[in-house]
Amino acid sequence: MTGTFDVGYERWVMWLEALTMREKHYTERAIDALRHVPWAARLIREAADLLQPLSQSARSQAKMGQLLEVRFSYELHRAGHSAEYECKASVGGSTVDFRVPGRPEWLIEIVSVRASDALKRATREDGGFP
């Protein structure tokens, strides 16, 4: 990551949550490549409208997370792996994002670290960083 932190909290967070044109084009290529990959069908179906302009909302944060899952799926596919998307885990009714069969079997949960609403409410801006 590049840049400085002296731009103020909100502007910095918006910069991190923006989808660059490079990411958009890469994600479009990923969606096209995964359209006929059986294990990715559900994700691609759910991702059909994700490349529309994103607003600063909880919905857009969910979209950004799903776009990350699309790009990760594409890299799994390019590496020759298949996966089960939104696989049921053995803890209650929980799921993990991907189960990749093999020895060892991989259970993968994609995590994107973003500012939560609670963090935004608990943070106040008092000038720039020194």
Image: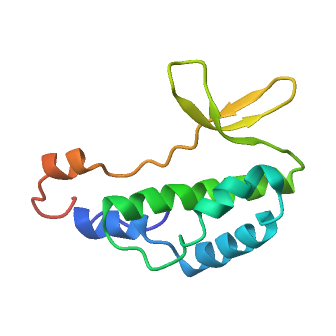
Residue 2 vs residue 40, the one in the foreground: 40
Residue most extreme to the right: 80
In the displayed structure image, the side of residue 20 where residue 77 appears, left or right: right
Residue 17 position (above or below residue 91): below
Left or right of 7? Residue 34 is right
Q: Quadrant of the C terminus?
A: bottom left
Q: Work out whether 64 lies above or below 109.
A: below
- Give the colouring mode of the picture: rainbow
Residue 102: percent from left, percent from top: 86, 28
Residue at image x 74%, y 30%?
A: 106
In the picture, measured across the screen, residue 95 lies left or right of residue 128, that is right
Residue in the picture at 83% in, 58% down: 37
Tally of numbered tags: 0
- For residue 46, side relative to residue 84 (left or right): left
Residue shown at 73% from the left, 57% from the top: 41
Please tell me in which quadrant of the rendered image residue 4 appears.
bottom left
**Of all residues shown, which one is farthest toward the top?**
91
Q: Is the residue 123 above or below the residue 12 in the image?
A: above
Judging depth in this view, the residue of 118 and 125 nearest the camera is 118
When asked about the image quadrant of residue 28, the answer is bottom right
x then y, percent, for residue 68 = 58, 57
| Residue at image point 38% right, 51% down | 114
Instruction: Identify which residue, 86 or 27, lies in the foreground.
Output: 86
Residue 76 location (% of width, % of height): 79, 50
**In terms of image quadrants, where is residue 29?**
bottom right
